[in-house]
Image: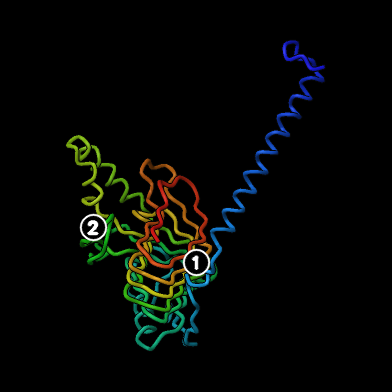
Amino acid sequence: MFNIVTGSHNGIKRYRVFILLIMSFFTSINVSLAQIQIDEFFEGGWVDTVGYKGFEFPADTFNVMDYGALDNGIELTTEHIQAALDDCAESGGGVVVVPYGKFLTGSIYVGSNTHLLFVDSTRIYSSMELEDFPEQWTRVAGIEMEWPQALININDAENVKISGHAIINGRGRVFWNKFDYMRPIYVENDLRWAVDYDAKRPRMLVANNAANLLIQDISLIESPFWTLHVLYSEMVTVDGLQLTTLLRYGHPARTVSTLTHRVMFWCKIMWCLQRMTIFV
């Protein structure tokens, strides 16, 4: 017989087996309950009414290299990428192709009926100059205001797809350094809330008043502010998106902030995140 006081070898082995059995029992119960909750969550057929509904994009393609895009990652090439996007939208839609390379850009805008396709694991680098992100009226932290536009913007558009295995780098360190420099002064004066508004920083991807949107398989890393912001939009699916924040910073970028209707998220979120908030 096992003696808890003397702790015989056989007794200790039986005790460990007993504990493992108990743990396995409760783990199986928790897994079963979790599966029941998942099944109940998807009941009612509501899944069929949400998210991207598909769209047959016109066959026309617009390769950014044909518009003079620079793929060295050093020279700003915003206007060349935007020219391809504008031609696509103005012609009724199609596929804007960004081939393998390194592209440095400020704010770009994706119009209706456009598939922005990143191929061959291309690298997109955000400008670190705030002037490359023009201010426009938007919503930030519950307040309507003028704010720098995001790196990638889908504004007042429908039938949009952004896909491919691109690594999109927000290079947010310079913006977070500014925030960290300003923050102590605001805290000392009981104005901690205000520094978020005064230290203006661009978001990485914003969908504003968009409909029938699919964001798929891209990676967003080192955001200067919020990483993905979907607001006033519907029929949106985010599938296979990988979000990676700045591990070394104490105030990592908020990951997903939405004010949306009928949105479905399937994301992989990595490293130190502050919070993920979805309002449906």
**Image x and y of residue 4, in percent:** 73, 15
**What x and y, as percent, mark residue 122?**
49, 66
Residue 111 position by quadrant: bottom left
Q: Nearer the viewer, residue 259 or 68?
A: 259
Residue 99 is left or right of residue 253, and the answer is: right
Q: In the image, what residue type sits under mark 2?
A: Ile
Task: Residue under label 2, please give it.
Answer: 143
Disc 1 is placed on an element classified as loop
The local crowd at label 2, few if under 14, some if 14 to 19, many if 20 or more residues have their Cα within 10 Å, is few
The residue positioned 47% from the left and 70% from the top of the image is: 50
Camera-nearest residue between 129 and 13: 13
Q: Nearer the viewer, residue 100 or 211?
A: 211
Can you give x and y, in whole percent of width and height, for residue 176 in the image?
32, 48
Q: Residues within 10 Å of mark 1 (few under 14, many from 20)?
A: some
Q: Quadrant of residue 249?
A: top left
Q: Is residue 275 left or right of residue 4?
A: left
Q: Which residue does the numbered mark 1 point to in the structure image?
A: 122
Residue at the spot x=64%, y=47% of the render?
A: 31
Drawn side of residue 102 relative to residue 180, left or right: right
Q: Which residue extends farthest top?
A: 6
Kindly report the distance in space between the C-alpha atoms of the residues bearing marks 1 and 2.
35 Å
- Quadrant placement of the C terminus: bottom left
CB atoms of marks 1 and 2 within 8 Å: no
Q: Amino acid at mark 1?
A: Thr
Name the quarter where the N terminus is drawn.
top right
Vertical placement of residue 133 versus 110, above or below: above
Looking at the image, the residue that sits furthest to the left is 189
Task: Give the number of callouts.
Answer: 2
Describe the element under mark 2 as helix, strand or loop: strand
> Residue at the location (56% across, 63% down)?
43
